[in-house]
Structures are given as structure tokens and as C-alpha cells.
Amino acid sequence: MHNFLSAVSRRKAGLAAGVVLAGGLAGGVLFTPGTAFASTTTSTTVGAITSTHHFNGSWSLYVPVTVAGPGGGTVSPDGTVTVSDGSQTCGITLAANGTGTSGGACSLGGLSAGAYSLTAKYSGSTTTGFGSSVGYGKANIGTAPAFTADSPSTSAANNQSYSYNFNASGDPAPAYSLGSGSAGWMSINTSTGVVSGTVPAGINSFSYSVIASNNVGSATAGPFTVQVSPNRHGNLVTSLSCTSRVHSGSQGTCTLDVTNDGNNPAPNVEGQIKLPSQLKADFCGHGWGWGWYNSWGCSISGNTATQNLGTLRPGQTRTVTVTFTAQSTRWLWGGGRQYREWVRVGGSAESSGYWGWFGGNSSHSTSWVQILPPRFWW
């Protein structure tokens, strides 16, 4: 009886042991030391990006990417990487390039000059169980600025305007700025590169430099040192006003006001009003006949009225006036009372120096006249 019970006990123990073993196999996982918590982390790196300028003006970027498997691992990642600039993408199929690393490259095309931020996303691998990862890169496409016009005048006069149009090549088009230490009264158009300003009284010289820059690089012109001489001329300012609307066959007038707003006299000032062909000059000056206006020094040549205004003292204004007749709309446009036309009139004044005074001074202005059909039609 005892032997029987012992045999039964041994049989139960053996059955229990068999159930435990079977349960372990049914779970489908047999762990070995060091593999139960193995890392699946990958690292994606964007390499040195290069750009290419194509004959049609567009650019492309060549983007190399490397993906590394878990640290210390010997298996190279497989799968794909997607590179994006935010608006378009290109794909890379990885190829092993060393123990535990893979790489590849692709190109983004049809790009314009500018700054780009790129994202390279590794999608992970079901074969190796490696996880996904993301790498980042930046690229600047274009050419650095190079000055093509940087020879400004190195002389100026007190109370006179000073200007120069700097220009630089580059893609993207560069922006302009004044360099450190430039004269505070100067300004620059950041888009066109025009430097301008009125030279203050009492200074003998000034310096400045100009910087052209884009996302690729920058270039500096200067510094330039400009010698300043006392202003021996006035500063002419013109204002032209004309009858704004005139019927064909009717008369109108244009008056050019010439003012010296400088601190010195403006010698030998000549004023001109240049009429377009649609406005026929009749007479100029303040008289109503050829003899009278000629006696005032005003004359008409072609369709331009010219008058010598003499020397203008500081703050003084003198005028040139011309009377014109608007031409027939039928003659101008071939008929039809519906036709109207705007024409431009130009005015100018210039002071020439004498007694050893250098240079001169000039000013220009414009006005517009609308020609209407005749008042009466037959």
C-alpha cells in the first residue's frame, strides 16, 4: 500500500512538472540573458548638404543621410528615409555602409534661392525591430553678394545733397545697410542701395561704408572718406503747376516757381518749361505779345519756354509762365468726343557758377494736364 501511494505521488509530481514546461512553451518566448530588454533606438544624421545651380535658374539640394542602429550593435538598419523641405520630399532606400550603420542620399529640385530647413525621417524596420528617428539639417541656396557699383564721389559741399547708387550682385538679391561709423545724417534705401543725405554746415569731411548681404554672405564697400567744401551756391527748388483740364482748342497756362532755399546766392539761374506736342506753346512771360515777353528775357524754341531769372538770393522766388493751346482731339486721336488724354509737362531750373565757383545746381518737377474734347462740335 505504501509503495502504491509513493508511485502515485511521484506520478502527480511528474504531471505537474510537465504542465509547467508545456505552459512555458505555449507562451512562445524563451528569454536569454541580455536580450529581454535590448535597445531599438536609432540615430538619424543629415550630412553635408550641397547645392547645384541649373541652367533654367532653379537650384537643387543633394542631401546625404546616415542612420545608426542601437549603440554597440552590429546590425545595420534597413528600410527608408524621407527627406522634406516642408513643401516637397525625396526618398532614400538605406544601404549598409559599415557595422551598425546605413546611409544614402536623395535630391530636392526646382528650388529658388533662399534658406531651407530640412527634416530626414527614418521610418524604422520591422525586420530588425529598430525604431524610427529624425534628423535635421539647414541649407542656404544662392550666391554671396559682390559689388558691381561702388565708386561714389569723394567730394561734397555744405548744405548740398550727397547721393550715390551702390549696386551688388547676388542671389537672393542683397539688402543694403550702412556700416558702423557711417555719418549719422546719411540714409540708405535697403532695396536699391541708394545712399543720400544733405551735408551739414560746418563739417570738413565725413566717412561711411555700405554693406550688401543675403542669406549666403555679405560684402562691404568702403569705408569712403568724403572731403567737404563750403557751399558757394544756393539750393534750387522748383514747383510746376498747370491748368489741370483744358478743352481742345482752348488755352491754359503753366507756371514754374523757382526758389533758392539755400544759404548762399544762386547765380545765373535759367528756368525752362517743356510742353508736350499736344500742348502748343503760344507765348511766355507776363505779357500778351511777342515783343513784350521777349523784353523780359523769355523765349520759346520749339515747344520749350526758357527764361533767365538772374541771381536768386537766399529765400527768393521767381517764376516762368507759358500760355499754351490744347490741340484738337480729332487731330490727335482721329475723332470721337469720347477721347481724353493726360499729358505730362516738365519744368526745370539750373544755376551755373562763375568767378571761379565750381559746379552748379539744378532742380526738376512735373505737372499733368488732361485734354478734353472741344466744347462745341459741328
Image (tube, grey):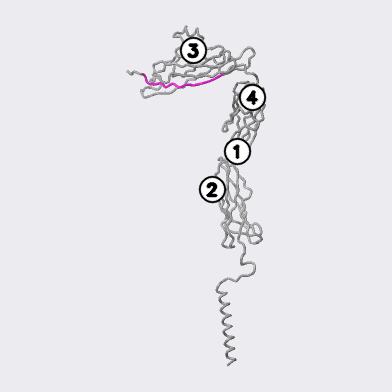
The amino acid type found where label 4 is placed reads: Ser
Instruction: Report how far apart the C-alphas of labels 4 and 2 lie in the structure.
Output: 47 Å
Say which element carries label 1: loop
The amino acid type found where label 2 is placed reads: Gly
Instruction: Report how far apart the C-alphas of labels 3 and 1 lie in the structure.
Output: 52 Å
Q: Earlier in the sequence, mark 3 or mark 4?
A: 4
- Report x, y in % for residue 268: 57, 12
Residue tagged by mark 4?
Answer: 153
Q: Earlier in the sequence, mark 1 or mark 4?
A: 4
Residue tagged by mark 2?
Answer: 86
Residue tagged by mark 1?
Answer: 214
Q: Nearer the viewer, mark 3 or mark 1?
A: 1
The amino acid type found where label 1 is placed reads: Asn
- Report x, y in % for residue 303: 48, 15
The amino acid type found where label 3 is placed reads: Ile
Q: Earlier in the sequence, mark 3 or mark 1?
A: 1
The reply, left or right, for residue 152 in relation to residue 324 is right
Say which element carries label 2: loop
Residue tagged by mark 3?
Answer: 300
Q: Residue at x 36, y 19 (%)?
A: 374
Say which element carries label 4: loop
Q: Earlier in the sequence, mark 3 or mark 2?
A: 2
